[in-house]
Image (cartoon, rainbow, N blue to C red):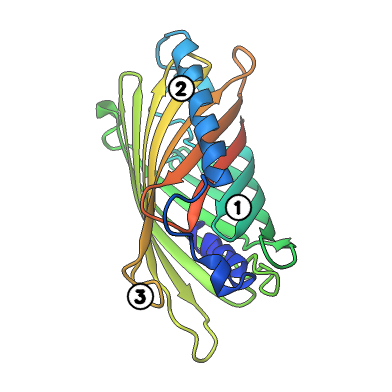
Amino acid sequence: MHRSRRSRVQHRKIEQAAPVSHRARPIGGPPVPHGIQVARRCCVLVVLALTVAPRAGKAQEEHGHIHGLHFSHPLFTESVTPDTKLRIELGEEWEADGKATEIELEGEFALHRSVSVEVSAPYVFLDPDLGPATSGAGNLEVGLKFANFAFEERGVLLGYGVGVGLPTGNAEAGTGTDHIWELAPFLNLGVAVADFEVVAWGIFGIPTNQDAGEEVETEFSYDFSVLYHISDRVQGLLELNGETGLSGEEAGEGVVAISPGVKVAPLPGSLLFIGVGVSVPINDEELDARLKISLFWHF
């Protein structure tokens, strides 16, 4: 579901907690940020996992979908397939001015093979380098996802839907908003070829219910994921995730990140998967890296 606005709110809170002199990066040979160090170590672990994993055929049985076209869930990108699942996620984000930690519980229920409803509830911890640490609830998100199986025999899935961000966050702590609602209509596409699954998303973020004088900050987010079934229990991922402002203070500005990861089923035939991924921006000097650990349990 659509999460980029919450990240921007967290970044502004961390930035506001530090003086201007602290926000600027030193010129000429700065030390490697802690987030980048962690990202490099995670990349090494991912590469090792992909290298030593045994080769096997594609496992459509991963989520109990033995029949019909089904796509596995990436880490930083959403799945295009309506599912019934629970996901618990721990995210760490390192920025130039501090660190943000997010714990999120997400539930999705498939009303039909072609439609599902999804709810996610985050709790956020902010730890600026200068200033007091804060924490609070994030914005509750509800989504409705549709899938079109007209081209199923060709391994193609078309999808669309809408997400709604509810103003349940703690504005004082900077972990969300207490008055802005956000509509996030989206389109997606999934293509399955042999052991590969390719997924693409496009999402518009449209805020509503702003206070008088408050800017309307619309944005466009895009995600691209390539997943490879290394074995029945191991999946390798490479994702590209980005967002750009369409209007408001950040119009024309954006960030693009490369996100490798791996998912592993700890037990043979298990519906439980554990995923680890790292996201490293390629054009943002303020965001160092993101680390994500996810637990997926499909029914």
Q: Residue at x 29, y 28 (%)?
A: 155
The numbered mark, 1 or 2, whose residue comes first in the sequence reads 2
- Residue contact at pointers 1 and 2, CB within 8 angstroms: no
Q: Are marks 3 and 1 in contact (CB under 8 Å)?
A: no
Q: Is residue 210 above or below residue 205?
A: below
Q: Residues within 10 Å of mark 1 (few under 14, many from 20)?
A: some
Give the residue pinned by disc 3: 247
Q: Residue at x 40, y 16 (%)?
A: 58
Which is more foreground, mark 3 or mark 2?
Answer: 2
The mark nearer the N terminus, 3 or 2, is 2
Whole-angstrom CA distance, mark 3 to mark 1, is 27 Å
- Circle 2 sits in a helix, a strand or a loop, which is it? helix
Tell me the tag on residue 47: 2
Residue drawn at the location 47% of the way across and 8% of the way down: 54
**Residue 83 in view, yes or no:** no
Instruction: Say which amino acid is labelled 3.
Output: Ser
Residue 142 percent across, percent down from the top left: 56, 57
The C terminus - image quarter: top right
Q: Sequence-wise, which precedes: disc 3 or disc 1?
A: 1
Q: Which mark is residue 119?
A: 1
Kindly state the secondary structure of the residue where label 3 is placed: loop
Q: Nearer the viewer, mark 1 or mark 2?
A: 2
On the picture, is 163 further left or further right than 297? left
Residue 156 image position (x, y, % from top left)? 28, 34
